[in-house]
Amino acid sequence: MHQSQTRAEPLLTARGVSKSFGKTQALTDASLALRPGEIVGLLGANGAGKSTLSRIISGHLRPSGGDIAFGGTPLALTSTRDALRRGIALVAQETSLAPDMTVLENIFLPDLATPGRLSFRAMRDRAGELLSGLGHEHVLPLDAEVRLLSAAQKQLVEIAKALALDARLVIFDEPTASLSMTEVNRLFDIMARLRDGGRALAFVSHRLEEVFAITDRVTILREGLAVAEDVATSTLTQGDIIQHMVGRDIGAIYTKRTAADTVVQDIAFEVRGLSSAPYVRDMSFAVRKGEILGLGGLVGAGRSEAVEAIWGLRARQGGEILVHGKPVTFRKPADAVRAGLGFVAEDRRAQNIVPDMSVRENLMLAQMGQHRGFGRGYGKRSAQMTQLIADLGLPADRLDTSLLNYSGGMQQKIIIARWLLTDPEILILDEPTKGVDIGTRSSIYSILQSAADAGLAVIVISSDFEELLGLAERIVVVSDGYTIADLPAARLTEEKLTLLAAPRTSTARNQALLRALAQDYDADAFWTLIDGEELICLAQAGRSLAGLPPGEALRAEETNVSVALAARHDDFVTEADGDRQTLLVQMTDKRGHDLGWIGVTVAGDATVPPSDEIRARVQALLHAEEESA
Amino acid sequence: MTDVANEPRGPGTLSTIVRSLEFRMFCLALTLAIILSLSSPFFLTERNIFNILDQSVVIGIVAVGMTFVILTGGIDLSVGAVFGLAGIVLAQLLQTMPVPLAIPLAVLAGAGIGLFSGVLVAVFGLAPFVVTLGVMAIGRSLSFIFSGQRSISGLPEGLDSIVYSSFLGIPANVLFLIGLYLCAWGYLSYAKGGRTIYAIGSNKEAARAAGLSVTFYSVLPYVVSGALAAVAVTFSLAQVMSADPMAGSGLELDAIAAVVIGGASLYGGRGTLIGTLFGVLIMVMIRNGLNLMGVSPFWQGTAIGSIIILALLAERLITWRSART
């Protein structure tokens, strides 16, 4: 545990940093202070500017405004090399290693830029020193080519590379995303050593459990603004952090139907158990005619990869796709187009726009893919197109000009119209409002809404939870490649969605425990977060007694175990009607942070399992983690 | 809609034409013609004009196939070698079979070679430059082997009729060239396949995601290119009545130059057959004009190379200026 009464002077202070990319303002007023001997968590929702800020500090990007001081003097970096020379290193998700060179060469890659002869013997000795300083001298073969290493080993090379330059400040940008639990613990051990060696560290992550496990303080960004700065981690709860990340700013740009308006229609499209390595592990969802389904989750959760796999753009390892209840396999996009699907891909420039073609040709592109015949098939769609462009507010006399002359929002509307022209029955849109101004956003929403009203099944992927809640009737939450919840939007809030979407390193371990408990005691075992009266059930196994389905967000009185939830007693608590007995055990990490509760419910007339034994099993699990760390 | 006000105004038809690259290339061809007719009294004679058209046939036909390939973002370095090989194949076939059977078979051979390159490029994802470089070496080597390292002459009478017959005073080979350009232009502009070829060159990912048959239409241009190289050699053989294993060396560079002068982008997606036609005419006119003026053939390469570079440079400067305004 790291605690100091008098804190060191900051090594790096950033004040009022702003950054814009064209018209998009990625950062407006971000601040950050990093001190020697401390790990600061840099948090924020998708697009809050965490990565932009890290990339500015590490010299990848130049700020548009603001002051950054490093070691007391103003810092104006011209390149990443400049940053490295001053002792600032970034360990990023996508590593900056040269895959065909050896570990040793990679660690000393920056030295290749210095004139003079290199001494491989000296380098080898120094590399050994660095790695043993990290406690890992045996894990890394110095002569192995980097492309043969695991993700965790590559990260270690990155860290060693930073240390070879004697980096005083290291930023870890989502370093744990592709690591196993043991590897995460090993990384945290290294981070703790670096901190205790007097370096300043920043830890950018979505994973709240990990933030609680390793950081001393946190800074939270929201929409490019620092909303909580340099707050001691020990004073915060998950709820506090999420409140800061989400904030409140609901506009009236959504015109949503209420659930009562819609008659339950047939399922138009269904995916069961889809997997596509490495991002999509097990995803299932279904969408009905006339329904807008939201796929929510964090960037990198595997949503885009899943729809690309459906569309035939990625290899599938498993899973079934059903259109109107009939199994189909799309080997290439043309198959999907002809089966009545439409797909607005995530990256407008790379995947949707044909830059050398006119507006008309871009509009007609998908219908040409659908058309069978020698000609372009424009004739049969021209009346429909005239109607559609009038709806979009696009003058007919500019159809033959270049698409590139139009704003991003108009381009996006044209791409959506491209698919509407094919008369699809199912329309999938990946981040349809990314980089689109607010005015065009609301017109995209109404286009989608009226398409749904006309009977289209619409699937919208969005990382903007506010948008998702406003637009979709039902939301399927995706986390780490799994669909973990399927809920009506009306029952969700941004906070709950953020909690559900947060990837949890402990998920697999906890699920195994739940299965074991359920089997051993013939019980209903569940894992839930409790925030006042609100519950969010993260996983469940065994019989259905407690009334806490996984992925559901409920109030205590809505469950079958409200008495036990209110009591939170050390032993089994019997409900008022005597039907059920429930034990709740809180899980806390070694620093006292709440990781949720494990509940075990058995029938009222069953023999009560030994509560000490269950508590011991939960504790053993938490303890095992600390041991391996 | 509020965002419409910010969108650009649609330009008029006239300004679209004036601003188009084809129009500028037309102006360049016209300027060249005027300069050449001023400097040589023989340039603007009926005989010489037919001469120019006649000389345009071979390179013009090959340039059509090259346009297809370049529009997809590829390149076909093998056309010269395919031209030579198809010529030898045709000459050998003509020893044993009649003209109407031998020509289609030779064209089929050219198409087959194109299919080979196309599959390697589009299905196996190999770089077009390297694949067609390899096919070029193979093709040239095979034409030496099939010919026995010598020219094949003594081709049957009747082959020359495809060149030396005429309709309304226009020679058959020129008529064929005009017909070919019309068909190919119509295909590239109005057929699904043609538009798919443009879409592939402009953004292959978007074309694939929109359900277009990207693989098929990535292979097709190479097939067209190989087949047209064989068609071109047929006209060439009919004129000289002998097949040389070295025939067509350097033809690929002329064809690429014509397409590029015609305004196509080597990255794909941009270019037209009208532009290519002007590119062909400009190249042939320069050669013809320099010959008339008695300039040494050794200087012609310098002249053509300079004009290619100047045309591209001017184009780039114009694009920069219009981007800034």
Image (cartoon, rainbow, N blue to C red):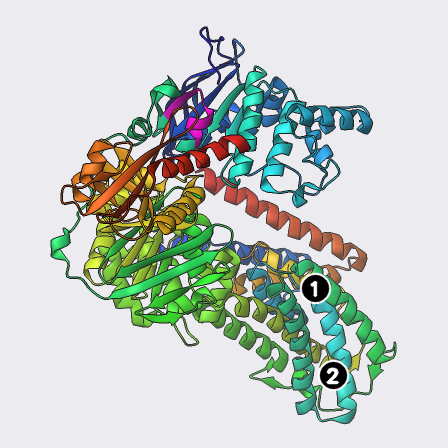
**How far from the left and from the top, in percent, is residue A64?**
44, 24
Q: Quadrant of the C terminus of chain A?
A: top right
Give the CA distance from mark 1 to mark 2: 22 Å
The chain containing the residue under callout 2 comes to: B
Element type at marker 2?
helix
Query: Measuring 82% from the left and 27% from the top, which residue is drawn there?
Result: A121
Viewer-proximal residue among A450 and B151: A450
Query: Measuring 70% from the left and 64% from the top, which residue is drawn there?
Result: B132
Regarding residue B1, the answer to whether it shows in the image is: no
The chain containing the residue under callout 1 comes to: B
**In which image quadrant can residue A297 be found?**
top left
**How far from the left and from the top, in percent, is residue A94?**
55, 39
Residue A451 left/right relative to B166:
left
Q: Is residue A132 magenta?
A: no
**In which image quadrant can residue B291 be found?**
bottom right
Regarding residue A449, the answer to whether it shows in the image is: yes
A447 up-or-down from A465: above or below = below
Upstream in the sequence, badge 1 or badge 2? 2
Name the residue furthest right: B149
The three-letter amino acid code for the residue at tag 1 is Thr
Category of crowding for the residue at label 2, using alpha-carbon neighbours closer than 10 angstroms: few (below 14), some (14–19), many (at least 20):
many
**How far from the left and from the top, in percent, is residue A431?**
36, 47
Residue on which disc 1 sits: B132
Residue on which disc 2 sits: B90
In magenta, the rendered stretch is A210-220
Viewer-proximal residue among A385 and A463: A463
Query: Measuring 73% from the left and 62% from the top, which residue is drawn there?
Result: B133
Residue A119 left/right relative to B51:
right
**How far from the left and from the top, in percent, is residue A385?**
28, 63
